[in-house]
Amino acid sequence: MSESEERVGALSRLALLVPGEHDTTGVLLQLMSTATDVLNVAGAAVTVVAHGRSEVVGATVDLLAEVEGAQHDYSRGPGVDALRWGESVAVPDVRAQWVRWPEYITVALRHGVSAVAQIPMRLGGEQVGALGLFTDRPRAWTGEDLSMAALLAGMAAGHLLTADALRRQQELAEQLQHALSSRIVVEQAKGVLAGTHNITPEAAYELIRGHARRRRITVQEVARAIVELGLRP
């Protein structure tokens, strides 16, 4: 199989993930695996941004998670810059950046990292995180390398944003269903009391609400007790 065919196959595995059928962890694992295969790097790591905070959520090698985390601990490093400016940061030889990121470079060299590239994971104006790529020897990152990495990062960002939108849509649907069910139970309870006491539905509701206030419970709880347990306030 040619290198081009291998790249197409790796990209297809990531592209064919169906939003909503794979959790965040699955998408990120596939992203790191695909990036490692396609770009022939020693390892990869992913940082995500949530509620204004950056967090390292995974790495192909545990030691790389420590390297990735070091820059966030000290608030400086190639990944921090990539997230701050929304642009890829490629470092052919980390030793040349000692003055710029001393703490990060110290950790990177200790764990055998010689070159790194940090790619923002974004879709449109929405930034999700950053993909970190690592090699154990200096590497002159090419425009093709960075374009391919940006494509992978963008695909993963799209999956994550779509999955998040689906989750929020499902939560909203569940909330609406709960509200509708509660409303139906209240209407049923009003009808029961109106028939039992020969009063209007409005008066029946006042009985329900008064009972709820005295017992310090919700109107829905009183209504359910009327309909299901035979409560008659």
Image (cartoon, rainbow, N blue to C red):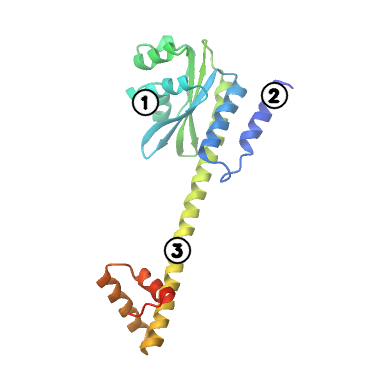
Mark 3 surroundings: few (<14), some (14-19) or many (≥20) residues within 10 A: few
Residue that numbered label 2 is attached to: 4
The residue located at (33%, 76%) in the rendering is 208
Image quarter where the N terminus lies is top right
Q: Residue at the right extreme?
A: 1
Rendered image quadrant of residue 108: top left
Q: Are marks 2 and 1 in contact (CB under 8 Å)?
A: no
Q: Nearer the viewer, mark 3 or mark 2?
A: 3
Labelled disc at residue 24 = none
Q: Earlier in the sequence, mark 3 or mark 2?
A: 2
* Numbered disc 1: secondary structure: helix
Q: Position of residue 192 (x, y in %)?
A: 41, 82
The residue located at (51%, 18%) in the rendering is 134
Q: Position of residue 107 (x, y in %)?
A: 39, 15
The residue located at (28%, 76%) in the rendering is 210
Q: Amino acid at mark 1?
A: His
Residue that numbered label 3 is attached to: 178
Image quarter where the C terminus lies is bottom left
Q: Earlier in the sequence, mark 2 or mark 1?
A: 2
Residue 75 appears in view:
no
Q: Position of residue 18 (x, y in %)?
A: 61, 43
* Numbered disc 2: secondary structure: helix
* 139 to 157, vertically: above or below: above
The residue located at (64%, 39%) in the rendering is 16
Mark 2 and mark 1: Cα distance apart in space: 35 Å
